[in-house]
Amino acid sequence: MNDSKSHPSYVAKYLKAVPRSGIRDFFEIVTTRKDVISLGIGEPDFVTPWHIRESSIYALNHGATSYTANLGLLELRQSISRYVEHRFQAQYDPTTEIMITVGVSEALDLAIRAIIEPGDEVLYHEPCYVSYGPIITFAHGIPVPIATHKENEFRLTREALEAKVTPKTKALLLNFPTNPTGAVLTQDDVEMLAEFAIKHDIVVITDEIYAELTYEGERPSIASIPGMKPRTIFLNGFSKAWAMTGFRIGFSCAPPELTETMMKIHQYTMLCAPVLAQEAAIEALKNGDKDVEEMRRAYKQRRNLMLKGFEAAGIPCLRPKGAFYTFPYIGDFGLSSQNFAMQLLEAENVACVPGTAFGACGEGFIRCAYAAGTNEIQEALVRIARFVKRLG
Amino acid sequence: MDELLQLLKTDGRQSVKTLADMLTLSEDEIRSRMTTYEQQGIIRGYRAVVNEDLLDPNRVRAAIEVCMKPDRGGGYDRVAERIGKFSEVESLHLMSGGYDLLVFVEGDSLKEVAGFVNERLATLDGVRSTATHFTLKTYKDQGVMMETGSEHERLKVSP
């Protein structure tokens, strides 16, 4: 019996307008196929280093099965405080300014909800991670994407920002190094962004989850710019650099009032991040530097390999300086991003993600992750080259 | 450690082209650096890591602790060199602690290894005593796990 027609829809109207992630649609097609080489994976192909996994097992053996403080284990917050100061030159008090969350995704949601009133506008750069637009909508804010372009290496420019800022602009959301483009900011860019934020009195939420995976050039954080701390929410986590995606541990650093507000939402919706994963994160910060260094080196080598392959195949691609994605330009082959990705999958069994999954200005691009084994990358490159040769 | 060496230590079969692409160097540069490492004796060889347990269940491995009488002038080196030249000896280390040399020996049978210890190793001048431990199973060798369990599969596409 199907009752669905006899009832009105119970779903909130504003949510109906949010499309589900383009990645999800693609995922469903890919899973129906066998022997696919996937460059479509947005997570490390490394397993979490054993000593980190083992620390979770040890904690479990010793009965670590309870809640933790809402803000997270103090020992972990203290480690994070030292880490952020050392690595990002920004000081945060572990007792009032740092909170452990369930991945950066939760932290980002909390940050937006903590500051947005209905109708507030939030600026963010596209192409970007798939959740940025929707979480702003979920908080009844208005997403205001700013297109970035390969000509500027997908960095934000003052002109583009000034063109979109209005009196209703409440926040600017940054993600450098960027998923999917691998773009990074220079010190000049960061200073420009800080000046812009101060001039228009807006909050900066900076998602720096890929910061450790920066391969060349500067690694400045806007959180370290004088005068920015009161208006900055700094987000980071363990998923990428320590290969801990499944542990779901992120964190936020923000002034006490903002942290307290985010904590209120976290307290009533999540309570705390899982204790076993927090224990693993303590170990990651204590003894994981060498792992991060080794994985960073491996990603860089694979990036080089992939860039060389695109070059040989005649596919233009910027040299990404961070994260583990390349974002080659395939717009000259006469296919839309979506069709290129679909046909590549059908013809050669290689999965990548159409650039449009990351915003309209991703048209003409595909995202290829190099968080994959070198043999896989090499075979995928052979297939991609064969595919574009046929396209002519 | 140099990135090239590190890559070769992980996979000695990488092609020169792949190594060149990964390190953004020319193929000639890779070749000449490998040759230099070989000439300097830093790279001592390239070989497969084999799980002998799967290959031949009768094959025997033993770790032998050797106590020695040091030689005036040569210390342990002269005897160690003599021991190392036996083809049965897979690896040989001078150790701190309760004995002097640790010798890993391989052979086709228990008898063969026993024969080597009795007839050749223990009888060497300078060797005071030996203690032989036979390997029952090898779990990890040269940094490689000998058995890999089923791997958890990642999602094929994720954001």
Image: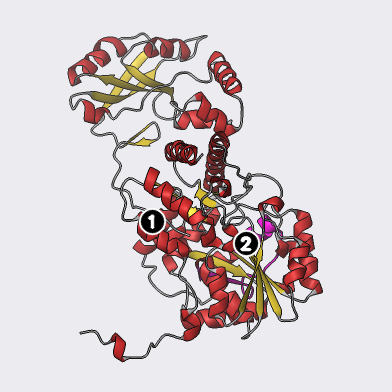
Name the residue type under label 2: Asn
In depth, the one of A73 and A323 nearer the eye is A323
User: Vertically, is A157 above or below B37?
Assistant: below
- Pointer 1 local density, CA inside 10 Å: few below 14, some 14–19, many at least 20: some
Residue A58: image x %, image y %? 38, 58
Q: Quadrant of residue A310?
A: top right
Residue A319: image x %, image y %? 63, 44
Is residue A85 inside the magenta stretch? yes
Q: Can you say which quadrant of the picture contains the N terminus of chain A?
A: bottom left
Q: Could you tell me how many numbered marks the image carries?
A: 2
Which portion, as a residue range, is magenta? A80-102
Residue carrying label 2: A175
Mark 1 and mark 2 on one chain: no
How far apart are the alpha carbons under marks 1 and 2?
Answer: 23 Å
Q: Which mark is residue B155?
A: 1
The residue positioned 52% from the left and 26% from the top of the image is: B17
The residue positioned 29% from the left and 39% from the top of the image is: B147
Q: Quadrant of residue B89?
A: top left
In depth, the one of A342 and A196 nearer the eye is A342
